[in-house]
Image (cartoon, rainbow, N blue to C red):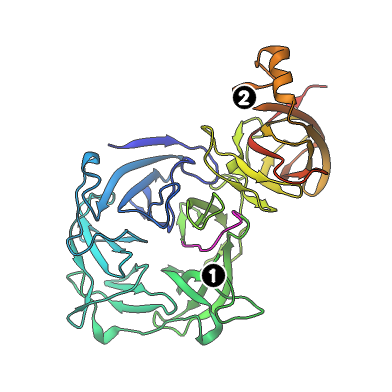
Amino acid sequence: MEKVYATGLHNPFLPLNIYIPDGEPKVFGERVYLYGSKDVFGGEYCCHKYHVYSADVNDLQHWTDHGPALASTDEYVQEGIGDGVPWSDGLLWAPDVVERDGWYYLYFCLSDGTEGVAKSRRPYGPFTDARQIMMNGEPISGIDPSVLQDGGDYYYTWGQGSCHMAKLKDDMYTLDEATYAEALISHEDGMQGFHEGSSLRKIGDHYCLIYASEYTEAYPKRGGAPTKLDYAVSREIYGPYEYRGTIIDNTGVDPSTWNNHGSVIKIKDQWYVFYHGSSGNRKYNRRARVERIEVDEKNAVIRQAQMTSTGFGEALDPEETLDAAYGCQVLGGACFTEKNGGYPMVDIVSGCSVAFRHFAYGKEAGDWKITLSMLPFQKGKVVVLADGEKKGEIFFAPGQTEAAAAADGGENGAQDGFLQTEGLLCGLSGKKELVLKFESEQEGKLAELYRIHQQPVKR
């Protein structure tokens, strides 16, 4: 059954209880489709089914969940889909989709190292008739397939450590061994730092290979965690590929951030990069994220983007009540999770901070009241910075919640059992990054932050 979510212009751009990593965006007709694997909160990498999400290209604030598209076990029969992968019951890892002659082909990999393809007459499935990807008469092994249509040819890339490529034959599941390339790029040669998650796209006259990268300037070969989406370009599809740099780095979205996976796409006149970020101080619980990017199409140059809280939009409305998990960078050991019916920032100690990028405060300078919904455990304060400039302080203590509830029946001071503590931010205008920095002389956990709300102060 389809569900439509009015998610607004936020990042993550799907509801906070939906965890879709490894996103490959594609535009078919007048809709953009997101193909990804599916994490389950509290679990590890992925699960045994895919869901497909889509939005009208003219309305990126409303996303439709088209329901289960493919499953590798029978555990989702009550959701209307059975086991569609006859050779494996592995977890379904990163997919991609391409269209040919009115058929949509879903390419996928599983946790046992096998890869396959299923097809549908609809871009959102369900996908059936799954077959293993074959070459030289044998099933291939690897992870993270992607497919690029270039003219009448379909090029298939996959691999970890090295990015392999070959043309698909007309049956769309057999690779032509005569076109096989062992390593377009790798983590060793050429210092491209390839880890996994290849996505081959065309930008102008250039082939652009996007991937999760280990590259660091200090140690270019297997240097770091693959938190970056880097890219390399070539005039020829088989290369050589020239390393160009980073598109997005998700370091700081969670203390245990490990990997990244995504791609770029042009929707109408605007380019975007789709990627993911973990939560819960784990490598998992990964949510789909997106950023607006600048692309020089003539030269295939992509300017590196910064993680934001806005995704498809340019700025947040400060008068909207936001869950803490819309913060785009959390530092000092704290993390975002699911708890008490919300999506708070937890494990906060002195020195932790969270950034919201960006709020739109209008052309004229004005004062704003900021309200934080939180659970305090110890005495401390929140220093509020706007573009690095200190704008206010908010004090909290563990006894405030009960005192506020006794004073007004919980209507203002302790809604939902949380403390509503306030501060004043003076002289705000334009688009600003807001950072909340927690400070205390106490050791140990200070508080949990659940929501943030602002409203203008009339003079």
Residue drawn 32% across and 73% down?
156
Q: Provide the residue designation for mark 1.
A: 230
Check residue 334 in the rendering and tell me which mark sits there, or answer none: none
The residue tagged with tag 2: helix, strand or loop?
Answer: helix
If the image is split into quadrants, where does the N terminus sit?
A: top left
Specify whether 364 is left or right of 198: right
Tell me the residue at 45%/53% (across/down).
267
User: Is the residue 145 above or below the residue 437 in the image?
Assistant: below
* Residue 30 visible within the image: no
Q: Residues within 10 Å of mark 2 (few under 14, many from 20)?
A: some
Q: Secondary structure at mark 1?
A: strand
**Which kind of residue does numbered mark 1 sit on?**
Asp
Q: Is residue 304 above or below residue 333?
A: below
Which is the main secondary structure of the residues drawn in magenta? loop
Left or right, 453 with reference to 164: right
Query: From which residue to which does the magenta span run?
Result: 253-261
Q: Residues within 10 Å of mark 1 (few under 14, many from 20)?
A: many
Task: Give the residue drawn at x 38%, y 75%.
Answer: 159
Q: Position of residue 228 (x, y in %)?
A: 56, 66
Q: How far across and down, in percent of the image, does residue 147 sit? A: 33, 68
Q: Is residue 76 visible?
A: yes
Residue 17: image location, x then y, percent:
46, 41
Tell me the tag on residue 417.
2
